[in-house]
Amino acid sequence: MHRKSEEISEEIKHVIQTMTKRFINKILYEDPFSPEVHFAKKPLYAALVPDEIFKGSHFERRFVTPFGHVWEKLAQVAANKGLGNCELEKTITGNIPQERLRRITEVLNKLEHAEKGKERVRPDWDTELKYILDGNGELIPVSVVCDVYAVDLEKGKRYAFEIKAPLPNSDQTKVSKEKILKLLSMQPLQVDSAYFVLPYNPYGKKEDYKWSFPFRWFNMTQDKAVFIGDEFWDFIGGKGTYQLFIAEINNLGREYRERIYLEYLEIEPPERNDRIKI
């Protein structure tokens, strides 16, 4: 493993360990599940359902919030070591011709609602972008907050990424597409490229991705503005970054799963294979 890969691995490990240790301390000591409190608040549920079921949901609710932005933090690690520089929640301000703004709204409306007597329009990134960029008019100042902003210091290229969970809903995807179209409509351009990103693919290969909701807004398997899984991580961190990412999560997962079984659930961990595979 060369030096950059080692640095990325160590940074990935640090991000996950820091967040997990903080969470485990909270769930074990600061905010543990209390059968007495649960019974006092929900006596009917407590009488009908074993405490262990609600102990699991107590854990899940407190896990999801602190880990809600883990993908962005891991992307920052990879991009800082790969492309060279990365910021999270970056506000990008620029001017967009008024007609381009109108066309962005038109494109999104046609994707969302079928015209009377016609089938709903299917997404076609190249056609949509060309139509929007042909618009002119008075320049209107617009600000866009992107999830991840990265600069390739060697090539001088600027990139914006909208990162969503691998099974995003329709509204989330629409908002991200609107942001991306606005970024690519600015004069002068404030980013060289912008992408809609899913950090991993639960369906395996990109061509097998099937979650229906984002398909309303993007052709998820064909549009060049879409990154799924390894193509994103290897783009921002260099070839092999996705494998490093998966390997580190699996290594840490064994340790933390065992602690959760023993210290939180208070049962012996079962024999099992790693959960995340390439």
Image (cartoon, rainbow, N blue to C red):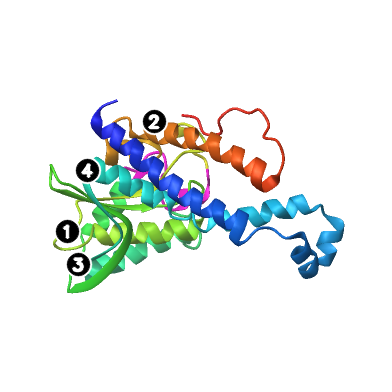
Q: What kind of element bears circle 2?
A: helix
Task: Work out whether mark 3 precedes mark 4 in sequence or the reverse, and give the earlier one.
Answer: 4
Q: Quadrant of the N terminus?
A: top left
Q: Is residue 278 left or right of residue 258?
A: left
Task: Work out whether mark 3 precedes mark 1 in sequence or the reverse, and give the earlier one.
Answer: 3
The residue wearing badge 1 is: 189
In the rendered image, the residue lying farthest to the right is: 47
Q: What kind of element bears circle 4?
A: loop
In depth, the one of 50 and 234 nearer the eye is 50
Q: Which mark is residue 94?
A: 3
Q: Is residue 215 magenta?
A: yes
The residue wearing badge 4 is: 83
Q: Amino acid at mark 3?
A: Gly
Residue at point 18% right, 66% down? 136
Residue 149: tell me if it is visible: yes
Q: What kind of element bears circle 1?
A: loop
Against 273, residue 124 (above or below) is below
The residue wearing badge 2 is: 243
Q: Are marks 3 and 1 in contact (CB under 8 Å)?
A: yes
Against 243, residue 139 (above or below) is below
Q: Is residue 133 magenta?
A: no
